[in-house]
Image: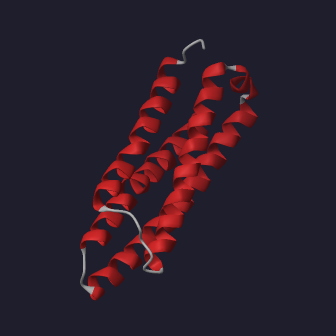
Amino acid sequence: MLWLKSFHIVFVVAWFAGIFYLPRLFLNHVRITDSAMRAELKLMERRLFGMMNFSAVCAVAFAVAMLIVSPGFLQMHWMHAKLALVGLLLGYHIWCYRLLIDFRNDRNIHSETWYRVFNEAPLFILIGVVLLVVLKPNL
C-alpha cells in the first residue's frame, strides 16, 4: 500500500505542476504578439499537456489501485469529498485542453486578467484535498 501511495503522490505532484504552469503559459501567450514566440508557446503548451495527461492517468491509476487494496476507504465520507474535488480537477484539466485547442487555432477569447484568475482556481482544490487527506474529518 505504501508503494502505491508513494507513486500516487509523485504523480499528483507532477499533475499539479502542469495544472499550475499551463495557464501561466496561456497568460504569456495572450501577451505575446511575435508569431515565432507564439509558435514556441504552442509547442510548449502541447508538450506540457502531454505530461499532464500522463501524470493524471498515473495518479488516477495508483488511486484506483489503492482503493482496490483498501476498499474500506470508499466507506469514509472524507473520501467522497476528496473524490468530488478530484472530479473538479479533472474538469479543470479538460477545460485546459479546450483552451489549448483555442490557442492552437488562434481563437483565444479570454483576457490576461481572466487567465490570472483561472490560474489560481486549482489552488483551492489542492488545499481542500490536502486538508481532507491529512485531517480525515468525520463529515
Residue lying furthest top:
138
- Residue 26 shown left or right of residue 86 in the figure: left
- Residue 49 shown left or right of residue 23 in the figure: right
Could you tell me residue 118's position as x and y percent? 39, 51
User: Residue 113, located in which quarter of the rendered image?
Assistant: bottom left
Residue lying furthest bottom:
36
Quadrant of the drawing holding the N terminus: top right
**Residue at 46% in and 25% down:** 131
Q: Is residue 40 above or below residue 100?
A: below
Q: Is residue 128 above or below residue 111?
A: above
In this picture the colour scheme is: secondary structure
Q: Is residue 100 above or below residue 91?
A: below
User: Residue 7, located in which quarter of the rendered image?
Assistant: top right
Between residue 10 and residue 120, name the one nearer to us.
120
Quadrant of the drawing holding the C terminus: top right
Could you tell me residue 136's position as x and y percent? 54, 18
Could you tell me residue 6's position as x and y percent? 52, 40
Between residue 85 and residue 131, name the one nearer to us.
85
**Residue at 50% in and 41% down:** 9
Between residue 132 and residue 30, name the one nearer to us.
30
**Residue at 54% in and 15% down:** 137
- Residue 3 in view, yes or no: no
**Residue at 55% in and 61% down:** 53
Could you tell me residue 75's position as x and y percent? 73, 21
